[in-house]
Image (cartoon, grey):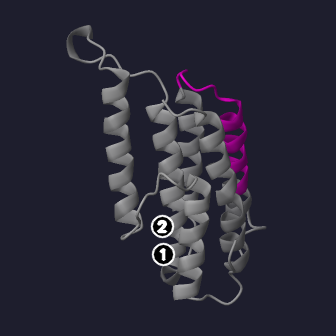
Amino acid sequence: MCQNATKTAATLMAAIEPTLKALLTFTGLINTPQGIAAMNAYNAALVALQNWQSGTAAQTVLELIAAFQSVFNVLPIPAELATLVNIILAGVETVIGVLTANSPAPVGVGGHAETQAMHQAFVAADASAKVAVLVPGFQRSIFHSPESQYNKEWNNAVDTNPVPGIGKV
């Protein structure tokens, strides 16, 4: 298990907030019913995540994150912002991976529980694959925190494809 999974996941989720707000502000959605719903869903997921304890089931937190994803995925965001949208979604997938890997391993076929280490390895591989689809070329680093890696990807995307009004974090 991650030494401090709650802090790791919550810090990464908190790092997503300024980028989410920047995207919603740029698109003019921040004060619309859709933008407000997205921010409310995000905030509910963040609060639940901050109160979650590593080693316990994360079902409620995962449901709130899924609710945020549902609201976010239907926002009318222009296609030219897809790279930034995908970075946000990759950050969320990473949070889900940390939560899932640090929750108890599921009971498998015949009532046999997979070991926690097997569970974590599977979840890490699955989350990494999902992030790779969303942010091709992303290289995970064990030497940098997830939030610093997230911010680096965002800043690289802003440098590579500048969008007036959306800046670095």
Give x and y (percent) for residue 116: 37, 23
Q: Residue at x 52, y 36 (%)?
A: 99
Q: Amino acid at mark 1?
A: Ala
Q: Quadrant of the C terminus?
A: bottom right
State the residue in front, 138 or 85.
138
Looking at the picture, does residue 53 appear above or below residue 17? above
Q: CA distance from mark 1 to mark 2?
A: 6 Å
- Position of 137 with respect to 104 (left or right) is left
Q: Residue at x 47, y 51 (%)?
A: 142
Looking at the rendering, which quadrant does residue 151 occupy?
bottom right
State the residue in front, 99 or 7.
7
**Residue 46 belongs to the span the image colors magenta:** yes
- The stretch in magenta equals 39-57
Looking at the picture, does residue 88 appear above or below residue 65? below
- Position of 15 with respect to 158 (left or right) is right
Instruction: In the displayed orientation, state which residue is furthest to the top.
Output: 111
Give x and y (percent) for residue 4: 61, 34
Q: Label 2, on which residue?
A: 86
Instruction: In the displayed orientation, state which residue is furthest to the left.
Output: 110
Q: Residue at x 57, y 59 (%)?
A: 72
Give x and y (percent) for residue 94: 49, 49
- Position of 155 with respect to 139 (left or right) is right
Q: Residues within 10 Å of mark 1 (few under 14, many from 20)?
A: few
Q: Amino acid at mark 2?
A: Asn
Q: Label 1, on which residue?
A: 82
The answer to whether marks 1 and 2 mark residues whose Cβ atoms lie closer than 8 Å is: yes
Image label count: 2
Q: Residue at x 67, y 78 (%)?
A: 27
Q: Secondary structure at mark 2?
A: helix
Looking at the picture, does residue 10 appear above or below residue 28? above
- Position of 114 with respect to 48 (left or right) is left
